[in-house]
Image (cartoon, helix red, strand yellow):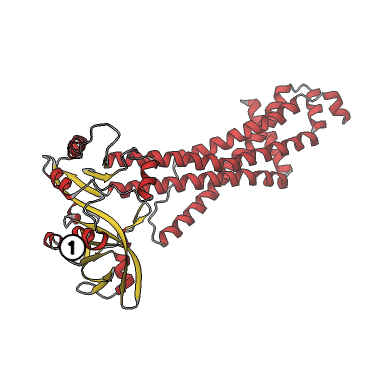
């Protein structure tokens, strides 16, 4: 311990004697640490936000969606197929009604999403339309009305031209004025506004404030000209049996759609727990990739440490020879320079943590001011990772220069050769 403290004392004196060079070396490590912390903290914040949004649908929610039969439900092939316009037309309201008769199902709402041009007076806007059955607010608790009321089952069965506006669309067309009882034009036809939904923000990359809700059958017959649905959101009566209920739904749809071979399902059944697990796995993989890329900057800082250590060894060759001449062992020289390299790396890591704390706090405050409620994230896991990586960079990139210093011949060093 005494020898280690002595090496640490020598390292501090050496770094202080070359303050300018030390600061330049520190800057590379600081930048690398800030990059790692910023990327990792941003990933944690976005993951937490998305998980909170998914969880807001309720632990007893089961989502049934259309799926490309040849692709697995969470695969890129399925997502690409849907995005490219592959139409899966086999999920229907009759399926939803059959699901509703299962013992542990307390309710559902079926729906589909589309787009259309909406206008009022001189204002035009391309809006997202969510055609949904009238029980949507009972299933999705995030649908809270600030004005008017949601449309009824009678409106849905009667293919009524009524609309419930998201907060963003209401502001676009009506500003601060009341929208209930007024009309907007959707795809060339007039729709009466029955209600306005409270601002709810985004879930992932979907901003629900830019959605307008219309009766599902109106969406099918007057907007899209189809007779199928894209999804069915189901709530389980007993949350403890959600997984069992999901299997019952799967068995029911497999029989109704005459699916005889595993892997050929034209639907997917996902519980909220499964959705959360998927989100965590996706963000985990993305976080590893981003942190690995950000760590490159800390590796560059480590190369800077190695270069400076080589310069330091060259400048202090006579000192090394003198120390060896009076009894210093090669391992003492090795330890001295290695401690110096590690001290620079860890000091840069600590300073980088302080700087990144300020940067992340200011960045998250600015993001919150823009209306994106991300939580400030500065986890112990990320701090330990950044400091460990800093320590390792000092260890790895300081070892070779320290070894070279320990191998210097004392007689030739004193002579200045």
Measuring from the top left, give residue 231's x and y in whole percent: 25, 49
Name the one closer to the observer, 68 or 279.
Answer: 68
User: Where is residue 186, by image quadrant?
Assistant: bottom left
Q: Is residue 119 above or below residue 41?
A: below
x, y percent for residue 95: 17, 45
Q: State which quarter of the image contains the C terminus.
A: top right
Quadrant that contains the N terminus: top right
Q: Residue at x 27, y 38 (%)?
A: 265
Front-most of 276 and 44? 276
Residue 24 appearing in the image? yes
Q: Is residue 8 visible?
A: no
x, y percentage for residue 160?
Answer: 16, 65
Disc count in the image?
A: 1
- Report crowding for label 1: few under 14, some 14 to 19, many 20 or more residues within 10 A (C-alpha): many
The residue at which mark 1 appears reads as 150
Question: Which residue lies at the image location 23% right of the left edge and 73% below the top edge?
Answer: 183
């Amino acid at each position: 311990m005494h020898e280690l403290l002595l090496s640490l004392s020598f390292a501090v004196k050496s770094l202080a004697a070359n303050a300018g060079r030390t600061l330049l070396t520190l800057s590379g490590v600081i930048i690398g640490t800030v990059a790692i912390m910023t990327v990792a903290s941003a990933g944690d914040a976005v993951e937490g936000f998305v998980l909170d949004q998914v969880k807001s649908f309720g632990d007893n929610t089961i989502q049934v969606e259309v799926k490309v039969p040849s692709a697995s439900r969470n695969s890129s092939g399925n997502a690409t197929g849907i995005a490219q316009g592959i139409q899966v037309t086999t999920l229907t309201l009759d399926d939803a009604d059959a699901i509703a008769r299962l013992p542990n199902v307390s309710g559902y709402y079926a729906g589909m999403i589309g787009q259309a041009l909406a206008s009022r007076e001189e204002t035009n806007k391309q809006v997202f339309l969510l055609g949904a059955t009238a029980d949507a607010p009972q299933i999705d608790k995030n649908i809270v009305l600030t004005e008017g009321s949601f449309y009824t089952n009678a409106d849905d069965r009667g293919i009524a031209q009524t609309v419930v506006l998201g907060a963003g669309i209401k502001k676009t067309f009506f500003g601060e004025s009341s929208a209930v009882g007024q009309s907007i034009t959707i795809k060339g036809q007039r729709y009466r506004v029955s209600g306005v939904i409270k601002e709810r923000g985004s879930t992932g990359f979907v901003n629900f404030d830019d959605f307008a809700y219309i009766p599902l059958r109106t969406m099918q017959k007057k907007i899209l000209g189809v007779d199928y649905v894209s999804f069915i959101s189901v709530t389980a009566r007993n949350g403890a049996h959600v997984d069992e209920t999901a299997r019952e739904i799967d068995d029911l749809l497999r029989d109704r759609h005459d699916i005889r071979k595993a892997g050929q399902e034209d639907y997917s059944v996902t519980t909220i727990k499964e959705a959360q697990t998927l989100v965590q796995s996706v963000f985990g993989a993305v976080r590893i990739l981003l942190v690995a890329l950000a760590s490159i900057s800390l590796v560059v800082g480590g190369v800077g440490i190695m270069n400076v250590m080589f310069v330091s060894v060259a400048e202090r060759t006579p000192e090394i020879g003198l120390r060896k001449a009076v009894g210093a062992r090669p391992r003492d020289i090795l330890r001295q320079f290695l401690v110096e390299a590690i001290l620079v790396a860890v000091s840069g890591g600590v300073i980088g943590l302080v700087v990144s704390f300020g940067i992340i706090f200011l960045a998250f405050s600015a993001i919150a001011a823009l209306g994106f409620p991300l939580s400030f994230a500065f986890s112990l896991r990320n701090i330990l990772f950044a400091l460990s990586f800093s320590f390792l960079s000092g260890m790895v990139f300081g070892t070779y220069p320290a070894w070279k210093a320990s191998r210097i011949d004392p007689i030739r060093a004193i002579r200045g050769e």
